[in-house]
Amino acid sequence: MDLYNGEILYYAAGTSPTLDLAIRPLKEAIETVKDSRFRTTIHFDQGWQYRHKNRVKALKENKVFQSMSRKGNCLDYSPMENLFGILKQEMFYGEALCTVKELTERIERYIDYYNNKRIKQKLAGMSPVQYRNHTSQLAV
């Protein structure tokens, strides 16, 4: 999630917490922000896959600052935890159980909706993508 506008940049889903599940979206996100003139910080929790040497190496090689909360304190990760709550409430609760493939497809559709159509009051009534486009036009 880009904390500037709340846009979901990349995600990965799987049936178990693997190293690839943690590294693949990281590499994709780094590609998106690598030309930024601002310092990039990535926040995540303390799972083993997020502390793995290959992931830490990828961050250092790309000059990305790593931020990790202390145990029992997820303040720097709270925007993502909030998104998970919104996603479950708006997309998942009350729905019939489905396969992992169907769930992944539903999440992809929801992220597209969240980024492109779901308006936010703090973004002046625009979706994250609309806000990014609007503010980038102002900067020109």
Image (spheres, rainbow, N blue to C red):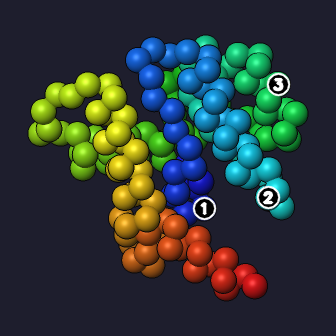
Q: Position of residue 84 (x, y in %)?
A: 38, 40
Label located before the other in sequence (2 or 1)? 1
Kindly identify which residue carries mark 2: 36
The quadrant holding residue 92 is top left
Kindly identify which residue carries mark 3: 57
Q: Residues within 10 Å of mark 2 (few under 14, many from 20)?
A: few
**Amino acid under disc 1:** Tyr
Task: Identify the element where label 2 is drawn.
Answer: loop
In the rendering, which numbered label is found on residue 4? 1
The answer to whether any part of residue 43 appears in the image is: yes
For marks 3 and 2, give the CA distance: 20 Å
The quadrant holding residue 29 is top right
Q: Position of residue 41 (x, y in %)?
A: 72, 45
Task: Identify the element where label 1 is drawn.
Answer: loop
Dividing the image into 4 quarters, which one contains the C terminus? Answer: bottom right
In the image, taking residue 21 as reference, residue 118 lies left or right, namely left
